[in-house]
Image (cartoon, rainbow, N blue to C red):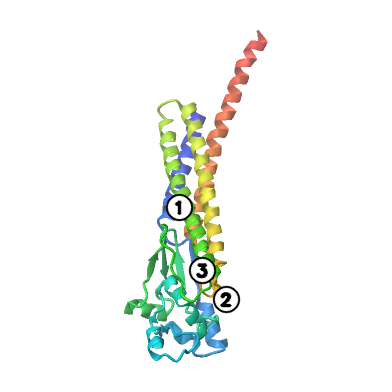
Amino acid sequence: MEIRTLVTAISLCMSFLSLILLVTAIFTDHWYETDTRKHRVNCDQHGTDPNDQKSRLMPIYHLPLMDNGNPRRNLALMKPIHVGSREEELLENWRSILGMGILETECGRPLFSTYSGLWRKCYYLGIDQDIDSLISKGIAQRCTTVKYHFSQPIRLRNVPFNLTRTIQQDEWHLLHLRRITAGFLGMAAAVLLCGCIVASVSFFWEENLTQHVSGLLFLMAGIFCTISLCTYAASISYDLSRVPPFIYGLPADVDHGYSWSIFCAWVSLGLTVASGCLCTTYTFISRTKGSESKSTPDSSV
């Protein structure tokens, strides 16, 4: 009985620590990070056009692709758009942006270091003076909310129908991946909490049964957490491979990767699976030894 109590205590401690790490991962925003400092240095030193980097601070004016000779219409299309605007606003003026050639080169695209989580995507402050200036002036927002709800498809002007449909379908698929990630991660935290409660009850009532049930709950939480983390990795890869690449992709010299929040989630997954295997394995071994001890006196008689 003392060994069983020790096993339950160890598994309860691991599961409780796992729950803390999982909750920390859910409510922090450092799942994925991008570092554009190297990219900016390369553009400053080896850029083809020294005026490319000016677009980081100057507003982008939307001009028509071809001059049709109507000055009123041309002035109506000259709507300023600032760095930090929504992707939909860039896509709304797809044709004019391509006509200007601002985003056709990697150095002409305004890129800043960011970090993102399940709920927000934010710019780093204190790394790039340009984005610090834009945020202080109110041109760009430091943090934007990650969208989990479906909104009406945007109407893209001067964009082929097939390309518009592809963009909308990609946004729909990415929305589903985000929902799966957040949903299964929340289920994993809930099931893990239930497992901790059942493991705590095992100290006072039906230790054998409650230990087995808590082990199964820990393993179930591990399955949910695995699905969530794999889906998150798939959503990141899917987002970076979307079209158009000059908006969704990243240049080769931009450092990007997973950060410490997702590391907490993976450590939580390991502790959860370990505590679940410990509870279920010890219950199975104790039952096997109990059946052998009962069969031994019967055979001697």
Disc 2 residue type (three-letter)? Asp
Disc 3 residue type (three-letter)? Thr
Mark 2–mark 1 contact, CB under 8 Å? no
Which label's residue is closer to the chain start, 2 or 1?
Answer: 1
Along the viewing direction, whichever of 233 and 178 lies nearer the viewer = 178
Residue farthest to the left, as pictured = 137
The location of residue 284, given as percent across then percent down, is 58, 29
Give the class, few, some or many, for how many residues have Cα within 10 Å of label 2's Cα (few <14, many ≥20): some
Q: CA distance from mark 3 to mark 1?
A: 27 Å
Which of the image's four quarters has the C terminus? top right
Read off the residue under disc 3.
Answer: 164
Choose mark 3 or mark 1, whichever is in front: 3
Which label's residue is closer to the chain start, 3 or 1?
Answer: 3
Question: Quick check: 82 above or below 226?
Answer: below
Secondary structure type for disc 2: loop
Using the image, tell me which numbered label, if any, was put on residue 253. 2
Q: Residue at x 48, y 61 (%)?
A: 31
Read off the residue under disc 1.
Answer: 182
The location of residue 181, given as percent across then percent down, is 48, 53
Mark 3–mark 1 contact, CB under 8 Å? no
